[in-house]
Amino acid sequence: MTFKVFRDKAQWVALFSGSIIFAGQWFLHVRYVKFENSTYIEHTPPVLNLLGLVLTLSTLLLGLITLPRWQSFLALLAFLWVTFIFVQGF
């Protein structure tokens, strides 16, 4: 397998995992985050946090490998959005 073939396949995996973390972050905030008395309370199961971490890191890595393509820009945008929401919550 050449690097070009790998990049062609990795761009779609990056886009797919980027869309998963984008939709998953929204779902987790709707389902597991509550605001009580101006306090941010999160009840996300640890397994979902670990899955989100793995998908986020794979999206970043594959997005950087396939960078000059539009799929990688969308994947990196999803990575930045999820990172922004995660940092903003603390």
Image: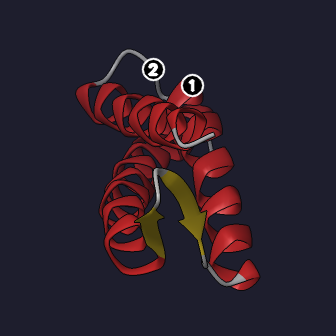
- Residue visible at 59% across and 68% down in the picture: 42
For the residue pair 14 and 18, the one nearer the viewer reads as 18
Q: Quadrant of residue 51?
A: bottom right
CA gap between label 2 and label 1 equals: 5 Å
Q: Quadrant for the C terminus, please.
A: top right
Q: Which mark is residue 67?
A: 2
Q: Which mark is residue 64?
A: 1
Residue 9's spot in the image, x, y percent? 44, 52
**Residue 31 vertical placement versus 22 (above, below):** below
Residue 30's spot in the image, x, y percent? 31, 71
**Residue 7 vertical placement versus 38 (above, below):** above
Q: Quadrant of residue 60?
A: top right
Question: Callout 2: helix, strand or loop?
Answer: loop
Q: Residues within 10 Å of mark 1 (few under 14, many from 20)?
A: some
For the residue pair 69 and 44, the one nearer the viewer reads as 44
Question: Callout 1: helix, strand or loop?
Answer: helix
Are discs 2 and 1 less than 8 Å apart at CB? yes
